[in-house]
Image (spheres, rainbow, N blue to C red):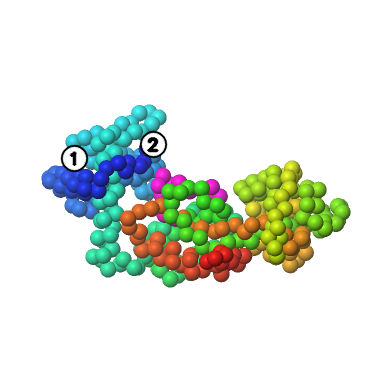
Amino acid sequence: MCRHFYRYSLPDVACAGVKVLYTLRMNKNFNPAGDRIAILQTFVRIVESGSLSAAALQMETTQPTISRRLQSLEQLLGVKLIQRTTHSMKLTDDGERCYQHARRLIENWQLLEDEVSGVRDDPVGVLRVRAPHAFGQDQLIKPLGDYLQRYPHINIEWVLNDRSPDFIPEGIDCAIHVGAITDPAVVAIQLAEVPRIVVAAPSLLARYEAVKEAADLATLPWVALSSFYRNEVTLNHVAHGEPCRFDITPRLSTDSLYAVRNAAISGVGVGMVSSWVVKEDLEQGTLQQILPDWQAAPLPVYLLYPYASYYPARLRKFIELMKEVMPSVSGARSAKGK
């Protein structure tokens, strides 16, 4: 499903956008402005989510309602906007133009509503945020609660998964992302970084010769966090930055940080983990840090969101809060050079 149609100029967009609203307004069987905007919002959501059923789910209504709104828009404009088959949807040329114009009109309408109602700086509505499983269910709950307490008219959908978000189809407003950025088509604000250390259970270390050099770690069994390392480990000396790289053949590979931690506690193998997740284990002695002078490069923590000409207050205030609190979240620290 194609969602990006940026080959039309701004004057074309504005002109055709006025034509869209004029056509809707002049139709005597159509309802007031709120409904005109609603029907355009529905069309945009169909395009961006990829299907009528997905749009219905995101807008918390039924698929027949979404279908009726689409049919109404097509009848009012006198053009076919979407070609539908049993298994696919495709925008027509008119549909591509209508999507661009409708999207810009909706953004301007949101700006107008906020300006006129005086709530531009008072967050309202629902903010949909994606965050990594481990970080999102542990370290970020307190700042999330602070945000909700500070702004009583906002609600948050807190979606936890470890994959990169597809903002428009999934209806995601922003995402907390740990690790390198692979999508250049998003705004990325680095909030902090998370140190990583090498740990193992004392029972496992007792079965092997003492580890004296970083290269000795290659002789131990490993548990791999496949999101960040699988068959090779790179450590850097804390004092002078000297790197040490070695290959591993992990006994267990997983994409779950908690699974790596639990496997390490069970003695399955050595693990390289974010320091915050094993803080209590180190204090209690169930895990032991190996060679504290050698650590992996810290993982950057970013706030991601798609480019837009206007951002509602609920997103702007959330960005401000994350920039303020993230460096002080347990286990995180200010990024170097920030």
Query: Which amino acid does the dot numbered 2 rest on?
Result: Met
Q: Is residue 30 visible in the rendered structure shown here?
A: no
- Does the magenta portion include 162? yes
Majority secondary structure of magenta residues: loop
- Write the residue at 40% across / 30% down: 87
Residue 74 x, y percent position in the rendering: 23, 37
Q: Name the residue under label 2.
A: 1
Q: Which of marks 2 and 1 is nearer the N terminus?
A: 2
Q: Is residue 90 visible in the rendered structure shown here?
A: yes
Query: Which amino acid does the dot numbered 1 rest on?
Result: Leu
- Name the secondary structure under disc 2: loop
- Write the residue at 19% across / 39% down: 77
**Residue mark closest to the camera, 2 vs 1:** 2
State the extent of the magenta-drawn residues as a range.
Answer: 160-174
Q: Relative to 43, does residue 300 appear above or below in the rendering?
A: below
In the drawing, does residue 277 fall left or right of residue 285? Answer: left
Quadrant in which residue 174 is drawn: bottom left
Kindly identify which numbered label has been placed on residue 14: none
Check disc 2: other Cα within 10 Å, few if <14, some if 14-19, many if 20+: few
- Name the secondary structure under disc 1: helix
Kindly identify which numbered label has been placed on residue 76: 1
Residue 206 x, y percent position in the rendering: 86, 56
Check disc 1: other Cα within 10 Å, few if <14, some if 14-19, many if 20+: some
